[in-house]
Image (tube, helix red, strand yellow):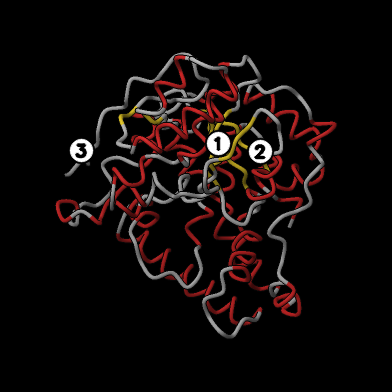
Amino acid sequence: MFINDKKDPPNFLTEFKNPCWYEKINLTDVQQEKIQNTCFNNLGKDNQICKIISKQRLPCLPYFMLIGTPKSGSTDLYKRIIDHPDVLSCAAKEPHWWARQQHSNFEKKYDLHKSERHSTILTNTQSKKANRYLGEGSQSTFWDNTWWWRYPENRNDEEPGIVTANFIRHILPEVKLLVILRNPVDRLYSGYLFFKKHTHVSAEDFHRRATNEVTKFNKCLTEHSLRHCAYTPTDHEVRLHVGLYALYRKEWINIFARDQILVLQLEDYSAHSQRAMSTVYKFLKLRDLSDEYGIKSGRANTRKKKTQHVGQMLNKTRELLDTFYSPFNKALAELMNEPRFLWQSLT
């Protein structure tokens, strides 16, 4: 079994709300002067911080991460969070570093935050304005552990020896994690319509693909463990495995404290967005501006006009998928001590 050898975390600076640290940089005299002058304009001439940042950069990692799940309202939720004046988004909403990119180039991807924003964080902190929290929203983080078999030493393993959550816990032990979950049956159909790599999109085509995936997954379970079947990389006709929420939830709470992970349900979030955002702000220890910002954003990533003609999934497809996901939903409801995650009244 191979465990990836990554660097220990830097010594994070205590004066920032985010996990930040200084790194030396090589700049020309002109570049250093430009950075200093910009800083002086914000903080005042001869400020010591300004002299530092012309020779060092300030990489920062996220204070919070929205880790899942795709086609479950995550884009809308992330937009509402970063609408808060005390929050600053990473350069990209979904850098996919933890579950994917770090296994190709650690040094290149480790800095998730564009350098031109470093002085903004410094300015906000040094001028005693509200510190801005960094967040990112890679939807692969919650469930994707297929990277394990990319390493030759691991190719004969039955299951991953560690998961993505272990890496995050090692680097960011105090990070706040958010997950938003949708009825896995509806999530699967929405993903099929949204990511459609196939040319012919129809309810009948979805039924065929879903049937094939359910058959293939159930066959895998007769020969291997659930973790093997969920995490082994294969060519999926539809991403059935993303909806195995109970498995992933259990992985995360085995590594992080429960109070570090906030789990939302899309159906409840959509019906009671202001209340949900108040819960999110409280979890992130942000000022509660749910009255002003909680309902500011419109729904993001809604169904595309090009697929609206397809209609709803077939009844027989829903019945098939309800049966498949039922034991996983039951396990999730027990883990959460929350019967609404059964999604029984929503189908």
Q: In this view, which residue lies farthest toward the bottom?
A: 200
Query: Alpha carbon of mark 3 to alpha carbon of mark 1: how far?
Result: 25 Å
Up-down relation of residue 288 to residue 186 (above or below): above
Residue bearing the label numbered 1: 135
Q: Is residue 162 above or below residue 120?
A: below
* Amino acid type of the residue tagged 3 in the rendering: Asp
| Mark found first going from the N terminus, 3 or 1 | 3
Quadrant where the C terminus sits is bottom right
Quarter of the image for residue 255 reads top left
Residue 113 percent location from the top left of the image: 47, 39
Residue sitting at x 39%, y 39%: 111
Query: What residue would you read off at disc 3?
Result: 5
The amino acid on which the numbered mark 2 sits, given as a three-letter code, is Ile
Which comes before the other along the chain, label 1 or label 2? 2
Q: Residues within 10 Å of mark 3 (few under 14, many from 20)?
A: few
Q: Separation of disc 1 and disc 2 at Cα?
A: 8 Å
